[in-house]
Image: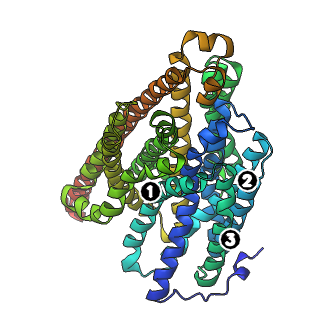
Amino acid sequence: MQFNVLNHASDVPPRPASQRGLLAVICACVVLVVGMVAAINLAVPLLAASALRPSASALVWIVDTYVIVFACLVIPGGAAGDRLGRKGILLFGLGLFAVGALMSAAAPNVAFLLAGRAVTGVGAAAVLPNTLAVLLHAVPAERKSATIAVWASMTGIGGVVGNVGGGAILSGGSWRWLFAGVVPIALVLAALVGRIAPVSPRHDRRLDPLGAVLLVGASVALLLGIVQGPEAGWNSAIVISGFTCAAVLFTAWTIVELKVEHPLLDPRLFRLPALRSACLGMTAVFFGMFALFYVNASFLQYGKGFGVLQTGLGIIPLTVPIILGAKHVGRLSQRIGLDATTALAFVFVGGGLLGLSTSGVQTPYVEYAAWLVVMGIGVALALPTLSGAIAGALPPEQAGVAAGLQSTTREFGSALGVAVIGTVLTARFVAALPSEIRADHDPHTVAQALAIADRIDDVVAAFISGADSGFRVIGLLVLVAGALVVLQSLLSRRGSVRQAHVSRAKAMKPSPSPADHTA
């Protein structure tokens, strides 16, 4: 199938005015698919109290199904764009995104809702990597670095826009409106992309469906073990089976990728220290940021009594440093170095999460917002720095795969962050509930606890205790990951310098003369 037949633009990059319009539309596409990751968190309290009556683990899966499908298929989405036409795959993804959102809006039960979320995730995986690939084809070489920085910033801002926009839609009172509201947005963006996006060259790269299936299966199995732990027990068959299957499938995926002619993601790429460090760093940053989004929505509604629109607006302090500071990160990196910039980013992200863990019902929102600003500074430092490192590690003809790798690390980190903080939150919440509430009903969500007990203050206090524990665990994990990233970068840099000295010494050593051989 030739997806490029959908395109009517020429193969010539657009003029500067058209480039600005294209950049705006592409950024809107990025904000849409990334914003959906964050917006669903605002609907968690509404979903928990809805007629669907999801369990605590089902709530996590409603959030994570979209994210994990998105994460695992984003590299195949980039590869499909490279082979079949980036503009055509981008249009196909926007259409599929709209279909999945419509399915979710009409879902009669949790299973149908999860199916809709999965379809939407497939659409998002086709959209995100091809947005960057289309942009990089459209702009001249001297503007590529700035374009990557803007695109990377949109992935951070998208989470905040998802919170604010989701809060505005959900203020109507139904979680279904969130999904219904994004359908016309996706269709309008598809029309605009079809009109102004240029056609980019295609590359004859074979797809790797087996690699994609193994990666999805391994990731779902890993999250299954993490998410089901609090309810089923960490020594239960489902949890142990989940972790075992994840190990087996990840191993099988590695073996397949090493043998296939055109791998989904060549594991040998991670021999490059800079790429390895940047991918780990990007995963850790989004691990922290989307763990925050998952808890923040419920914390402000349950703990502070905010309405859903106030909750969406309550995350805005996080975005201020991202909007104002991203354009200055390049100059800062030149002055203090990439390692120092990366270290600062993790100190701010991890420190912000630890600061948020001290918040309680009596904590003024101004103090809570200050810690959001601290975390936002870290995100603003991290995104352009790490995105540039990943994009620069692969050749231009693999722009779709490079963008897919960036997106995979982001979305996998997001899914893992939601799963881990949801697990910690649920376990601590249940433990902190009064024994008489736990004894008869064993509730695992705030909605379940409030439905069987009128002791609202005790239930909210238990939730705050769980949220604080979750923030502490996530904050510490982010700091540890940041230390590993910086340490690996320093060691690899020293190794490169040592190798350069050895190579220079060999080059300067005089070659033996024929007389030496005769002697």
Q: Position of residue 214 (x, y in %)?
A: 69, 44
Badge 3 amino acid: Leu
The reply, left or right, for residue 494 in relation to residue 412 is: left
The quadrant of the image that shows the N terminus is bottom right
Residue under the point 67% across and 65% down: 93
Dot 1: few (<14), some (14–19), or many (≥20) neighbours within 10 Å?
Answer: many
Q: CA distance from mark 1 to mark 2?
A: 26 Å
Q: Mark 1 and 2 residues: CB-CB less than 8 Å, in contact?
A: no
Badge 2 amino acid: Ala
Q: CA distance from mark 1 to mark 3?
A: 23 Å
Dot 3: few (<14), some (14–19), or many (≥20) neighbours within 10 Å?
Answer: some
Q: To which residue does mark 3 refer?
A: 187
Mark identifier at residue 367: none
Mark closest to the chain's N terminus, 1 or 3:
1
Front of the two marks 1 and 3: 3
The reply, left or right, for residue 434 in relation to residue 392 is: right
Q: Position of residue 462 (x, y in %)?
A: 49, 22
Label 2, secondary structure: give it.
helix
Q: To which residue does mark 2 refer?
A: 105
Label 3, secondary structure: give it.
helix
Residue under the point 59% across and 10% down: 436
Residue under the point 60% across and 79% down: 201
Dot 2: few (<14), some (14–19), or many (≥20) neighbours within 10 Å?
Answer: many
Label 1, secondary structure: give it.
helix
Q: To which residue does mark 1 refer?
A: 156
Badge 1 amino acid: Gly
Above or below: residue 111 compared with residue 129:
above
